[in-house]
Image (cartoon, coloured by chain):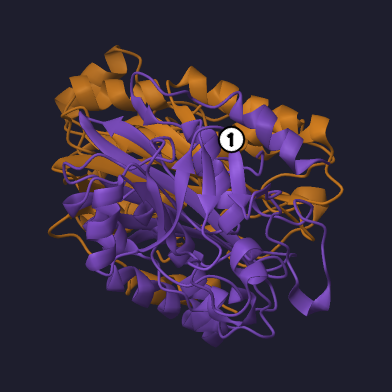
Chain colours: A purple, B orange
Amino acid sequence: MSERALIRWIRGRLGKRGGRILVDSGDDAAVVRVDGDAALLKTDAVIDGVHFLSGEAKPEEIGHKAIARSLSDIAAMGCVPTFAVVGMAVPRRATMPFLKRIFLGMNRTARRFDTCIVGGDLSSYDGPLAITVSLLGETRGLRPVTRAGARVGDRVLVTGPLGGSIRGRHLTFTPRVREGLALNRHYDIHAMIDVSDGLVVDLGHVCEESGVAAVLYPDRVPRNRTLEEALYDGEDYELLFTAAPEEADRVARANLGVIIGEVRPGRGVFLNGRRLKPRGWEHRFGGKHVPPHQNLPVNFWCGPEA
Amino acid sequence: MSERALIRWIRGRLGKRGGRILVDSGDDAAVVRVDGDAALLKTDAVIDGVHFLSGEAKPEEIGHKAIARSLSDIAAMGCVPTFAVVGMAVPRRATMPFLKRIFLGMNRTARRFDTCIVGGDLSSYDGPLAITVSLLGETRGLRPVTRAGARVGDRVLVTGPLGGSIRGRHLTFTPRVREGLALNRHYDIHAMIDVSDGLVVDLGHVCEESGVAAVLYPDRVPRNRTLEEALYDGEDYELLFTAAPEEADRVARANLGVIIGEVRPGRGVFLNGRRLKPRGWEHRFGGKHVPPHQNLPVNFWCGPEA
């Protein structure tokens, strides 16, 4: 099965922008009209062996990651997460204390971001632990920031250092909910995404949706270790966004982002004069390298089609 | 692991009615406030080997069931489903045509009830096919009908015949979305639920939440085969509701429901003078009888705690 092909096929059949759909499946979250108001809707799953290893991750970390990924997507729209429902498929051998600790980790992270878990569904089955979190968000009168608004001349910014999250931070990262809201509320942000698949891939999504190219300043990309990791590792969950030059300077002065590049005419992501190939995030659990996009959890919204 | 105990524990930690939460996890769907308006939120999963057998069910039926279960829960609140997001955990051996047919079945049912799938998430993994559908619903200015409003003297009604859905109808049932909305819009319905776990269990939920008892008229329960099946089989997805006697007669005259019993003071569900034990729906796929509540997919909202 080719996941990319299936995603493309499915996306062609999903609801399109227009009428009740304000932002469709081409972005971090869908924005829909509910009884007159705009609301955000997002679902995301974590699965043992794909997104974490239950033998290595603490149960609280598993719960945290399960909800923090969706929180990060609402953050990337510059909006406010409010309510969550949780579907848990649980292996029969799972113990009560283990599952309770997962729930507590999830609930603690939800509360930290004023999000309330209001219900869910639990099935035991013959399979690995899988947690699907669906989030509802609200706009509070703000315009959701899509991936499609980057303009030539914009600066590219990121909220924090990138790379190497596989060494543990992918289980403990802070979703940039407060930063995303502050950016949307106080600054004119043109386009935004969270870095889940890697800087080059996610910046590529912004470029593609906006019909522009981006040039990265190699010395400016904040990195945890190497530039290579900062460019290609995923699951950093920092926010990546663009704004006009003066606005970008204001953001940088407020310590809400670091300028790492600029938007140019054309297409693709460039560094030192060469176009970077979008390489997806590879699962490297247990030392196994899985070819990108083979084992990749793919969002209908952000399928690696770049 | 005791699922019942875990559900009870989790429910004790979920958001409670009050403030932004209009209906909490004790009902078919949560009702929350989003930017001032009430919205409904529901998640539900179907898993190969638990809720269907991929070797026996048609792919379109699997997709249908995955979304129709959640549609039925919104129907049981007398409200309007609007948008869905879908999480799919897919075994690596699954083929494109199989997955496409599942999606088409799901999408056809969604559209039939004016519900738009706006996004989702896809992971391939080492496990059985699992589909988690999360639904957003709106109230259109109506009051959501909870399980908690049944009053002594009410009549108990059901929208259609019960029992025996395991012989195939659990894959092809019609969620009573139009009936639920018509009942809520044109009649004074006091309490409502969908029959997913079985008539006795689900009527028991209404009684417990409302603080009342119910007496069934044995000759009036519409059944597909035996009374036993009508009482205890699950997955009929007909709506079960209560209304004052004159209102119940109006509903019956409009062919929107059949009167099958009445609400009395006390607690429990009675038939022929004896109290019926709530026996949950048992999975009987492949001829295996699994003890109730062991293999039972349990909703945080409707855990078999009666």
Q: Give the SS element for disc 1.
A: loop
Amino acid tagged 1 = Arg
Can residue A58 be seen?
Answer: yes
Q: Would you call the spot at circle 1 few (<14 residues within 10 Å), some (14-19), or many (20 or more)?
A: some
- Residue B252 in the figure: left or right of residue A234: left
Q: Residue at x 53, y 87 (%)?
A: A97
Q: Residue at x 44, y 66 (%)?
A: A68
The furthest residue to the top: B254
Image quadrant where residue B217 sits: top left
Where is mark 1, residue-wise? A267
Q: Quadrant of the C terminus of chain A?
A: top right
- Residue A142 in the figure: left or right of residue A281: left
Q: Quadrant of the N terminus of chain A?
A: top right
Rendered position, A58 above or below A232: below
- Residue B192 in the figure: left or right of residue B279: left
Rendered position, B145 above or below A109: above
